[in-house]
């Protein structure tokens, strides 16, 4: 028996909308301000990171070793793996120096 092309398409339902983003879509980004304090000076850096990136990603973008810094949000230390979800300002205190 020969079937013509497309004969089985009558019973197939059309695919629904997908829940994931298309491959060409880029994840949203947020701006994070990092203020590195050392002695009496403050070096201010602004970086754009993908939403959900950990704090350590922002530190690496400004050339800081994450493990050598304490990071404060509103005066409270936060873990380096805290996901960045909103634009914010972080205080970075280096905890060791070279020499």
Image (cartoon, grey):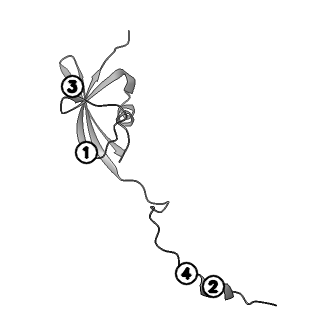
Q: Are marks 3 and 1 in contact (CB under 8 Å)?
A: no
Reading the image, the residue beneath label 3 is: 42
| Mark 4 and mark 2: Cα distance apart in space | 8 Å
Q: Indicate the secondary structure of the residue bearing disc 4.
A: loop
Tag 2, which secondary structure? Answer: helix
**SS at mark 3?**
strand
Disc 2 crowd rating (10 Å Cα; few below 14, some 14-19, many 20+) is few
Sequence order check, earlier mark of 2 and 1:
2
Q: Could you give the CA–CA distance between mark 2 and mark 3, rounded to whole angstroms?
A: 66 Å
Residue 77 vs residue 63: left or right? left
Residue 60: x %, y % from top left: 39, 32
What residue is disc 4 on? Answer: 13
Structural crowding at the residue carrying mark 3, measured as other residues with C-alpha within 10 Å and reported as few (<14), some (14–19) or many (≥20): some
Picture layout, residue 18 above or below residue 30:
below
Q: Of tags 2 and 1, which is closer to the observer?
A: 2
Q: Identify the residue position indicated by label 1 in the image.
A: 87
Task: Name which residue lies at 61% across and 88% down.
Answer: 10
Residue at left offset 53%, top offset 80%: 14
8 on left or right of 58: right
């Amino acid at each position: 028996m020969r079937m013509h092309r497309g004969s089985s398409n009558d019973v197939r339902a059309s695919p629904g909308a997908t829940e994931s983003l298309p491959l060409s879509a880029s994840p949203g980004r947020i701006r994070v301000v990092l203020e590195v304090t050392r002695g009496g000076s403050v070096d201010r850096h602004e970086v754009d990171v993908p939403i959900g990136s950990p704090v350590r990603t922002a530190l690496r973008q400004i050339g800081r070793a994450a493990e050598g810094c304490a990071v404060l949000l509103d005066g409270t230390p936060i873990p380096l793996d805290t996901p960045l979800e909103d634009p914010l300002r972080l205080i970075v205190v280096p905890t060791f120096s070279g020499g």
